[in-house]
Image: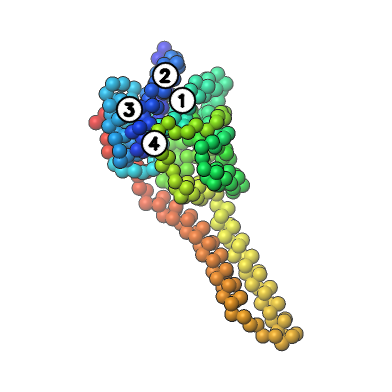
Amino acid sequence: MKKQLLTVIVSCYNEQDSIPYFYKEITKVADRMKPLTFEFLFVDDGSQDNTLQVIKNLSQKDQRVRYVSFSRNFGKEAAMYAGLNYAKGDFITLMDADLQDPPNLLIEMYDAITQEGYDTVGTRRVTRKGEPPIRSFFARCFYKLINRLSKVEMVDGARDYRLMTRQVVDSILMLNEYNRYSKGLFSFVGFRTKWIAYENVERVAGETKWSFWKLFIYALDGITAFSTIPLMLAGVIGLLFCMVSFIAILVIVAKTLIFGDPTGGWPSMVCIVFFVGGVQLFCTGIIGQYLSKTYLETKHRPIYVVKETEQE
């Protein structure tokens, strides 16, 4: 009987220091999961350091190591999508090279699929040890907000680290949209999912590539990708201000007719104009976000461009 194949997809961007540690740990896990054969698919997301050469060195001594290298940095979402496209496995997992995704969990994840009947097994952090408090606070707020706005459930603390069957991966690949938010896409396709909780693990080497600003933009992408409620909210705010303005006009007219008191005070008027103008710009900005996403989708640009693979 032919052994089943498990593909480990590793997105890499300037991870030359982390990859040797990761490779050492993942091969230990592979040796313990004897019923399976493994392939380690590294996706180099246009790294500026020696990441690609480190991967090439590994591929020369281990035939299980494959790689895909981008022509420039396209972002982690593109790297994960490319990995799913190039993966050959019957089971596929997404992992980071910094060992914040514990490789040992793969054994429990595989058992959950093969013995408990799940289609996919995801992981979530129950703590955010080592993370700046302000970043943790906004992360929790984001999950609360998006779960109120979206019909697709987002699990607080969920990682991209998950093990999936080939059927689940093929379903995700059908969603070839340009603006990708994988956590939402994983939830969108459905299937029976088990969640494994674990405590946060700090990076084994190097520094995180996710600044607060990048995470903020990523959060906006997630909201606009899986909810149209902000568009409705903009309309509601506009209607509300029209009603308030109409009532204010009636009050001013009545006050003038009864008391003969002319409206005065340009500072208060300027404040009102600025406030209403700010609300209008805010609502226009919401609409602009959705228009920009639509604009990028209609261009039909490729999600990534491959420069080379191990087969070339």
User: Please, what secondary structure does the residue beneath circle 4 have?
Assistant: loop
> Which mark identifies residue 285?
none
Q: Looking at the picture, does residue 265 appear above or below residue 240?
A: below
> Does label 2 or label 1 sit earlier along the sequence?
2
Between the residue at mark 2 and the residue at mark 4, the CA separation in whole angstroms equals 22 Å
Q: Quadrant of residue 196?
A: top right
Residue marked by disc 2: 28
Between the residue at mark 3 and the residue at mark 4, the CA separation in whole angstroms equals 23 Å
Please, what is the three-letter code of the amino acid marked with disc 4?
Gly
Residue marked by disc 3: 66
Discs 1/4, front: 4
At 43% across and 14% down in the image, what residue appears? 34
At 46% across and 50% down in the image, what residue appears? 213
> Does label 3 or label 4 sit earlier along the sequence?
3
User: Please, what secondary structure does the residue beneath circle 2 have?
Assistant: helix
Residue marked by disc 4: 206
At 61% across and 75% down in the image, what residue appears? 268
Q: Position of residue 231 (x, y in %)?
A: 55, 56
At 57% across and 35% down in the image, what residue appears? 127
> Does label 3 or label 2 sit earlier along the sequence?
2
The answer to whether marks 2 and 4 mark residues whose Cβ atoms lie closer than 8 Å is: no
Discs 3/4, front: 4
Between the residue at mark 1 and the residue at mark 4, the CA separation in whole angstroms equals 18 Å
Please, what is the three-letter code of the amino acid marked with disc 1?
Pro
Discs 3/2, front: 2
Q: Residue furthest bottom?
A: 260
In depth, the one of 86 and 73 nearer the eye is 73
In depth, the one of 166 and 285 nearer the eye is 285
Q: Position of residue 255 (x, y in %)?
A: 72, 81
Please, what is the three-letter code of the amino acid marked with disc 2?
Lys
Between the residue at mark 3 and the residue at mark 2, the CA separation in whole angstroms equals 18 Å
